[in-house]
Image (cartoon, helix red, strand yellow):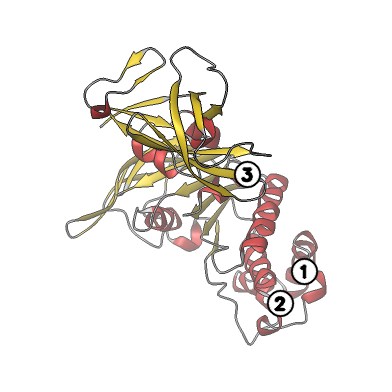
Amino acid sequence: MKIKIEQLTKKYNEVLAVNNLDIEINSGNLVSILGPSGCGKSTLLYMLAGIIEPTEGSIFFEGTRINEVPIEKRNIGLVFQNYSLYPHMTVMENLIFPLRMANVKKKQAMEEALVISEILRIGDLLKRKPKELSGGQQQRVAIGRALIKKPRLLLMDEPFSNLDAALRVEMREEVKELQNRLNITTLFVTHDQEEAMAISDKIILMNKGRAIQYSTGEELYTSPNSIFSASFIGSPKINLIKQDVGLKIKHKQVGEQEIIGIRPEDIIISKDSKIAKDDLQGIISDLQNLGKETHFKLEADGIILRGLMMGNFQFSTGDKVYIHFRRVHYFRE
């Protein structure tokens, strides 16, 4: 299902939770809504669901304005951070509940539940109750309950935040595979940049109610349109150097109100020779060996840079090095 959002705004007294959004989401895409706490990402999701009413603007599903359409008629599936399973019901009863509420006969509802349980690998859990399930199993049941109605749109609000790190990775891989198989338009709210980058066709990066950048994860990383985008995406964080340092990089003198951005992994260091004639000289002031990668800190021309190198690191604290930048970003304050 294709979604179009026009000048969508939600205002609480003087607070703009969502501020004048214009976005189109193609049918079958998985789009993450990413941003810090309080940026408006869940508010946007709940307006799409019909839980929250917009203050201004319009939402279109396949060209039809749905602002006044009640939640039960929007043909959506919802998955929340808390699993919201009925504790007194078995997994089977939880799965068929939405169909039974829609007056689907029990036999047919159970047949549908068997199909969805096999897809989600919970077929052997159908007789258990939620308290007998792990967190990951409960989340699979919650996803199954959202999908059993065969919705045209799946909305997920921080669905894996209660899971441990390893299980989060496993679940996001499963959700991406499931979404591809079913070809269902999906919006996925998260504050985790790695999660968004891993599963999304596109990402809506939000801050203070606005969509700062709407693009693929690769574009967000390689071509950030602002200091906020550059700083939010990437770990370790991008180095930001203000114009008053007077640093000259790649034959370009940094101008007034201009800020240079250099990602740690774009810093190349060498002991013996320059890669380019305008390379800087500096000293390694700190090292942190993390196994597969080493984080290092450089002091050069009165500035501090944080770098990252994969594999075997052949340098030591105090080494004098030449510093080359593989790629440089330029921003205005």
Q: Residues within 10 Å of mark 3 (few under 14, many from 20)?
A: some
Amino acid identity at mark 1: Ile
User: Which quarter of the image is occupied by the C terminus?
Assistant: top left
User: Which quarter of the image is occupied by the N terminus?
Assistant: top right
Separation of marks 2 and 3 at Cα, in angstroms: 43 Å
Mark 2 vs mark 1, foreground winner is 1
Q: Is residue 323 above or below residue 28?
A: above
**Residue visible at 46% across and 19% down?**
279
Mark 2 vs 3, N-terminal side: 2
Numbered circle sitting on residue 293 = 3
Residue 127: image quadrant is bottom right
Residue 256 visible (yes or no): yes
Q: Measured from the top left, where is residue 238 in percent x and y?
A: 43, 38
State yes or no: discs 2 and 1 in contact (Cβ < 8 Å): yes
Mark 2 vs 1, N-terminal side: 2
Numbered circle sitting on residue 91 = 2
Q: Measured from the top left, where is residue 49 in percent x and y?
A: 45, 57
Q: Measured from the top left, where is residue 52 in percent x and y?
A: 36, 60
Query: Which residue position is annotated with label 1?
Result: 122
Residue 148 visible (yes or no): no
